[in-house]
């Protein structure tokens, strides 16, 4: 079971999930340029930006609630550059002072106990606690989101613009742009562009668009290029992803 809604935190999505009651094969979490704070059966962890699909084997019946921050937003919440969390899953208390992490963990645990008792869905009830803390940290951070640079880069790579053009649009050189992107997204603009394009292609394919049309609409040279990129970033074929 999976559900989500647009978060009250800017550029974030609140999601919740319960694993099946019986053992299932590992599921693939696709790279998307995002970072998450995740409540997983009582513990809080941070998922950094992935460069390839992350395979998760769930405990039967495991419950998750997460707040997914759009590309470039997570570092302001977690207080570290995105590059330091690339391809990692780490306990929240590895990043925040122990007292802050424990306080949020305790509040999340209380919400997890109260929500179902009130007949409410776990996700929105516990998620409200995560949203409140994220909003507080975004308002008090010493590492604010560079919304102009993030917006320019994300818009540019989604439009398929070359890095030289994106650097010119942001008013900084390519090397400095690459360093800034590593801090904001966890990887450079070319990798971010590949990941966002792949996600668009998968969404189109899941919606029933034929592969050849997916390749053309998403900006691949041809269907073979689409196939290579999907396998490179996810480890499986496009067909396997959408089955």
Image (cartoon, rainbow, N blue to C red):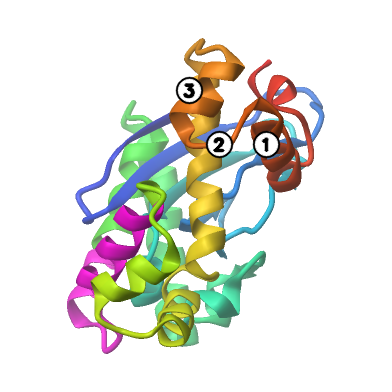
Residue hosting label 1: 225
Can residue 231 be spotted in the picture? yes
Q: Using the image, tell me which numbered label, if any, was put on residue 96.
A: none
Residue 177 left/right relative to 209: left
How much space separates mark 2 and mark 3, taking CA atoms? 13 Å
Residue 72 found in image quarter = bottom left
Q: Nearer the viewer, residue 172 or 133?
A: 172
- Give percent across and percent down for residue 227: 71, 32
- Which residue is at 25% across, 81% downward? 171
**Looking at the image, is mark 1 or mark 2 earlier in the sequence?**
2
Number of residues whose C-alpha sits closer than 10 Å to that of mark 1, classed few (under 14), some (14–19) or many (20 or more):
few
Q: Using the image, tell me which numbered label, if any, was put on residue 204.
A: 3
- Magenta region includes residue 136: yes
- Give percent across and percent down for residue 91: 60, 70
Residue hosting label 2: 220
Q: What's the magenta region?
A: 133-157
């Amino acid at each position: 079971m999976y559900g989500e809604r647009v978060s009250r935190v800017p550029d974030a999505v609140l999601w919740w999930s319960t694993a099946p009651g019986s053992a299932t094969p590992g599921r693939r979490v696709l790279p998307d340029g995002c970072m998450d704070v995740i409540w997983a059966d009582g513990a809080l962890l941070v998922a950094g930006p992935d460069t390839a699909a992350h395979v998760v084997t769930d405990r039967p019946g495991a419950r998750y609630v997460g707040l997914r921050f759009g590309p470039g937003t997570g570092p302001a919440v977690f207080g570290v550059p995105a590059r330091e969390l690339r391809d990692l899953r780490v306990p929240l208390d590895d990043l925040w002072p122990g007292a802050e992490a424990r306080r949020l963990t305790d509040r999340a645990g209380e919400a997890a106990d109260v929500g179902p008792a009130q007949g409410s869905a776990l996700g929105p009830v516990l998620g409200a606690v995560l949203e409140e803390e994220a909003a507080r940290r975004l308002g008090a951070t010493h590492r604010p989101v560079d919304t102009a640079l993030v917006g320019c880069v994300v818009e540019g790579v989604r439009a398929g613009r070359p890095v030289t053009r994106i650097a010119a649009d942001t008013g900084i050189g390519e090397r400095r742009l690459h360093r800034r992107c590593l801090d904001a997204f966890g990887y450079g603009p070319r990798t971010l562009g590949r990941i966002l394009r792949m996600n668009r292609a998968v969404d189109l394919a899941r919606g029933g668009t034929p592969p050849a049309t997916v390749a053309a609409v998403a900006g691949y040279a041809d269907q073979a290029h689409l196939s290579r990129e999907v396998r490179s970033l996810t480890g499986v074929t496009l067909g396997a992803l959408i089955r």
